[in-house]
Amino acid sequence: MHMTKAQTRGGITRRSAIRVFIGGGALIAAAPSLTLAAPSSSDRAMTIRDLFGGDIGPMVIIHQDNIVTLEAPIPDMGTGVEMALPMILAEELDVDWQQVKIERFKANSVPNAEGQRIQNYVHQGSGGSASVRTAWPQLRKCGVITRRIILTAAAVKLGVPYDQLSTDKGFVVTGGKRFPYADFIDDALMQDAGLVKQKFTAVDNPHEVPTYEIDIDGDFWAVKPRQEYAVIGKDVASPRLETLLRGEETFGIDHNLPGQLYASIERCPYIGGDVKSFRAEEAKALAGVVDVIAVPAVTAPDSDYEFNTPGVAVLATSYWAAYKARQLLKIEWDKGPQTHENTAWQYENSITAFDQDDKRDLHNSGDVEKGLASADKVLDVQYQAPHFAHLTIEPMNCVASVTDDGCVFGAGVQYPNGAIQFISDIFGIPVDNITHLTCKLGCGFGRRARDDYLAEAVYLSKTVKRPVKVIWTREDDIQHDFFNPMSVTRMRGGVDKDGTISAWDCLFSSQGGTNMQSFPTLLIPNMRIRHTRNASKAKLGAWRGPGHNLAGFYAEGFLNELAELAGRDPYEFRIALLGGDRGLPYTGWYPQRPENPTISTKRNKAVLKAVAEKANWKGGNPAPGKGRGIASHYTFGAFAAMVVDVTVDQTDGTFQVDRVTAAIDCGLVVHPSGARAQIESGIIDGLSAAVHQNIQFDEGRVTTRNFDDVYLTRMDTSPRHIDISFVGEDAEPFGTGEIALPAFIPALAAALYDATGVRIRKLPIGDQLKKT
């Protein structure tokens, strides 16, 4: 039972800088000192019904039978946020989870005083392991205020003082009697909206997306203490599970619009290339084909940045007709300026870039060269990794209809408000006239944060004045991806006679960035981290754990090498290096990062100790063909430590991952089964990437085409056992979608070295373990 009186724990403090008041239904920016704007000339004051668009609260609908519909505000690409976020709402609203239904909250933004669109209630974006982290405080507020609205109406209707009411699983309780929330909804909807003080809060933090957050007077919210949680932290069943299992869930590719045409696009395969000319007589002659048109690279009015790849689109009455006709096109390509670029050139150019003068210092402390010169032993090695593709199970697709009245589009997108704003900016359609059809995402990993596939569908619909559905093939999806950048990293390190690290020097060369500023930065007195750029022009994008995915492989892999150089156990080596409990200054990004963020050595040690205890760590495995490895990494505010056990076939070098033991500190675990699934998927995705991913280029084009070229881990090659422990649940919640992969890959490499003596410094692993 949840009491109305303020609790003494778990308060949410106001941390806003801008107030936005509602007057007559319009948001009006105002300074905090200004008074509430008077209602407009309407005959009545604004009500709760007006404020929340007919609902009882933000993302909450209570039906007459006391069934509660909670709307999930952030797209779910397999991360489980369609469960986790409604669980937060349900907890603070104090409803019975068995009575809950879940729907999707549509993109929601409002204009500020300057006309800029600001997201309402919560940041509706999925990326950076930020969904639960950013939504946590706001959704708790939404649940609290909705419960308060119901209790206020109940106090009036029942004639009972507010402080004599409590709630329990969707019922108002007083004097031993229970009244369903539904009894008070009509009265609650007609309450004066002044109950919630009619004001919103906009985030004013450079590390966050500005969002109007619902607010009330006072600096304290009566949120539930954690010991009373009935939903958060529990393995509750998903209300949408049956829909998913029956194949009735809606994904982007399931969206259709009346009268739509299907489009299959032959895109220019060359980096920076274009369509020089094309002939389409044969394609147009195929039954069902309606038209063949060029698709230009779409750019913003004030920029030459190309959001999509130019090509030629076949439009037909069926996808099959469009796809078959596309194969009949005769296209001459302008190959552009990068025909010299191939995979070998990318690596050679990256190594050449080591000698460039424009290196960027990311960290520099002490005297690295002096520390190396005085070291007892020195190691100078080179690591490298290829481009990684997203390989989402659902290829890119979008259906769009552009009319004089606006635009309707259906697609899986990670940032719905951003997608709407993109269409508005590029095609000149007012935001209020754009409708996004929501759906579940068939994976994202950062790929559905891009807008190229949206631009194609909207452009084609606007051009032919009919709805158009663009569907990508798997070959399209791989060859026109936005890749995780390939990189080459030179690591130099020295150890003293006492087994401590005297110096650490990291120089990585990449078209993008690698986040090497976490552990062991600031733990080594003589340390330098530098970045130089190669000259590749391959398309890049965020890929699971951007910046961190390879940082773990490089830094943790080299740390294991230095431990061996020093003659020390890699686990004990890490614990000693972390030293006493303290916070180390951190310059990297993570969601809702404070002004002076730190990395906790205490929490890092805790996951290492937990995984070592759970795995019964005693060093490597001396049995023939057996190996054990350990590693940890800090990603987007959360800690992960892994021990990997492998068995390697001594004849052909193939191997099986026998067990992965993981210890995770992501703070409070809101949705345990979802969090476990994310750690498991990060491990399996990491195995696929480490062993098989190897996107190839030749003559300025991607030559990797399909899953026969880039293998995904199947069930028979997946880890036999995955054992996950969550620690540190007293902290605020952080995401789990990206934290496992950066720790798993170096732990796997260490295990393979333990089993074979072959040091893995180059990805993919491929056949490196095969004896010649």
Image (cartoon, helix red, strand yellow):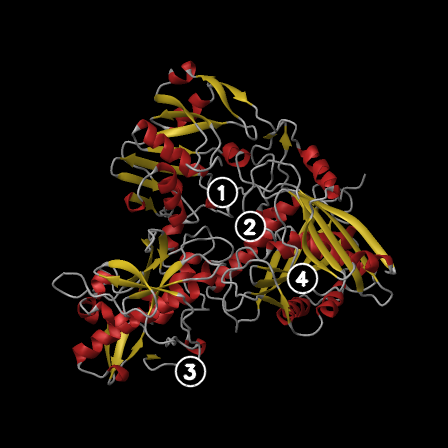
> Could you say which disc has been placed on residue 519 in the image?
4
Q: Alpha-carbon distance for marks 1 and 2?
A: 14 Å
Closer to the chain start, of discs 3 and 2, is 3
Disc with the residue nearer the chain's start (2 vs 4): 4
Which amino acid type is shown beneath numbered disc 1?
A: Ile
Q: Which residue is mark 1?
A: 393
Give the residue at x 61% y 63%: 586
Kindly report the distance in space between the C-alpha atoms of the residues bearing marks 2 and 4. 19 Å
Task: Return the disc, 4 or 1, that comes first in the chain's sequence.
Answer: 1
Residue 544 disc label: 2
Position of the C terminus by quadrant: top right
Labels 4 and 3: the sequence-earlier one: 3
- Location of residue 224 in the rendering, given as x and y in whole percent from the top left corner: 39, 76
- Mark 4: few/some/many CA within 10 Å (<14, 14-19, 20+): many
Residue 746 x/y as whole percent: 69, 54
Amino acid type, mark 3: Thr
Kindly identify the residue that appears in the image at 60 percent across and 63 percent down: 639
Location of residue 644 with respect to 313 vertically, above or below: below
Q: Quadrant of the N terminus?
A: bottom left
